[in-house]
Image (cartoon, rainbow, N blue to C red):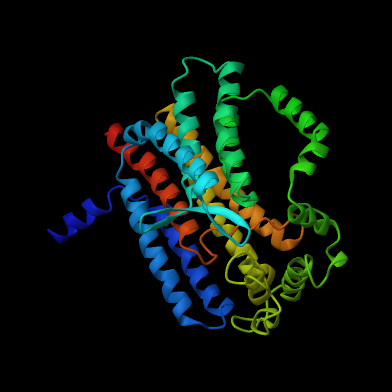
């Protein structure tokens, strides 16, 4: 009886993906303990975040893809309305207007769009009969541009880039012609001065610091310099858990969130990084397999976008910590401390599991 209940409870959980996710999360908890100065209360809080995130993942895994498809348009419209609400009535904190107070709730609508945008675009392209036309891609680009522009206005460059990436992957997987991609690249390059003028001064400073962080070693370049020192000092095998000097002596900033990869690199070195990259690669490969086996256009596009967006999360974070990308405030997925990003990521993987396990049920 208990065995049947157990199987029923976990029948929509993909075991391979779950093992990879759980293993990565355990690595994250060990690193958080070190990065937080052995603060067990911070680790406990992250454990609660993981439990809540797993609950969201389980719920998403039990919602059939056809039901998710019906939710796409209402969720997208709700997200856009909330973003407009943020622009008009949002709570301002640290110079950014990203939060919306709705009664006792304090929500960040941009997080909703990480899921809503790819769902909406996947729904839109699944409704197009035959090969999508250029007008369909233009409409998709407009559906993507509206929330991205609203998020950039807050300003929140990191989230806007992730939302833009999730939407772009849908356009690409839907069959966007490479000539259009090339033309877009040329156009973007030509309009670089315009985009540069639209950036806030601190955003422009981040890009300038990327090329030479020593311009401001105690200011804008401090994060990058200390992070690169930590990564380099790890060597091949690292200094050992809890023994990273840049971390334990408080040289490394934001070490529990955006720069936790530098903590990991210092303590476990190149070999540890290979292990972590292997875990990420297994997650990504499993996601791509699920996407390739999806039984509907909506499921295929959504699964592909979720997987490639997860790759973008990891690549951008590791890139900015390593000094090859500007610092844009993107956490390392499944490793960095934080509740909102953890819930969003696990919710996405719950959708992946739904696509995989419901496919099996239909096939049998």
Q: Residue 267: give x, y in percent of width and height.
A: 64, 77
User: Where, quadrant-wise, is the N terminus in this rendering?
Assistant: bottom left
Where 187 sits versus 86, above or below? above
Q: Is residue 94 left or right of residue 25?
A: right
Q: Residue 262: give x, y in percent of width and height.
A: 67, 69
Q: Is residue 12 left or right of residue 309?
A: left
Q: Front-most of 317 and 99? A: 99
Q: Residue at x 33, y 42 (%)?
A: 357
Q: Residue at x 31, y 49 (%)?
A: 59
> Is residue 116 something one can see in this rendering?
no
Q: Residue 6: give x, y in percent of width and height.
A: 22, 57
Q: Is residue 127 left or right of residue 146?
A: left
User: Where, quadrant-wise, is the C terminus in this rendering?
Assistant: top left
Where 167 sits versus 103, above or below? above
Residue extending furthest toward the left: 1
> Is residue 305 something one can see in this rendering?
yes
Q: Residue 49 is drawn in which quadrant?
A: bottom left
Where 290 sits versus 321, above or below? above
Q: Residue 196 is drawn in which quadrant?
A: top right
Q: Residue at x 33, y 32 (%)?
A: 66
Q: Front-most of 103 and 61? A: 103
For the image shown, how many numbered marks are present on the structure? 0
Where 55 sits versus 252, above or below? above
Q: Residue at x 81, y 35 (%)?
A: 189
């Amino acid at each position: 009886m208990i065995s049947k209940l157990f199987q029923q409870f976990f029948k929509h959980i993909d075991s391979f993906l779950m093992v990879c996710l759980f293993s990565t999360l355990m690595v994250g908890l060990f690193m958080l303990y070190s990065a937080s100065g052995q603060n067990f209360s911070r680790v406990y809080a992250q454990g609660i975040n993981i439990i809540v995130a797993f609950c969201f993942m389980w719920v998403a895994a039990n919602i059939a893809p056809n039901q998710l498809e019906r939710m796409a348009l209402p969720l997208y419209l709700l997200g856009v309305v909330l973003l407009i609400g943020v622009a008009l009535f949002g709570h301002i904190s640290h110079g950014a207007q990203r939060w919306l107070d709705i009664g006792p709730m304090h929500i960040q609508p941009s997080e909703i769009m990480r899921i809503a945008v790819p769902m909406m675009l996947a729904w839109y392209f699944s409704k197009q009969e035959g090969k999508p036309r250029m007008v369909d891609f233009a409409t998709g680009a407009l559906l993507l541009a509206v929330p991205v522009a609203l998020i950039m206005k807050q300003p929140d460059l990191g989230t806007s880039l992730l939302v833009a990436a999730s939407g772009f992957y849908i356009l690409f997987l839907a069959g966007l012609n490479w000539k259009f991609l090339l033309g877009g690249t040329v156009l973007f390059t030509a309009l670089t001065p315009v985009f540069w003028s639209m950036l806030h001064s601190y955003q422009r400073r981040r890009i300038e610091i990327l090329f030479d962080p020593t311009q401001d070693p105690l200011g804008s370049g401090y994060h990058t310099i200390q992070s690169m020192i930590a990564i380099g000092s790890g060597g091949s095998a690292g200094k050992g858990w809890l023994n990273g000097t840049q971390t334990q002596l408080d040289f490394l900033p934001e070490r529990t969130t955006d720069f936790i990869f530098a903590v990991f690199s210092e303590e476990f070195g190149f070999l540890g990084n290979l292990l972590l990259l292997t875990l990420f690669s297994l997650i990504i490969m499993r996601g791509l397999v699920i996407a390739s086996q999806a039984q509907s256009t909506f499921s295929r596009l959504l699964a592909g976008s979720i997987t490639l967006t997860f790759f973008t999360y990891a690549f951008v974070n590791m890139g900015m910590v390593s000094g090859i990308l500007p610092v844009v405030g993107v956490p390392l997925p499944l490793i960095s401390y934080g509740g909102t990003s953890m819930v969003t990521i696990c919710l996405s993987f719950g959708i992946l599991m739904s696509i995989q396990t419901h496919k099996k049920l239909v096939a049998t």
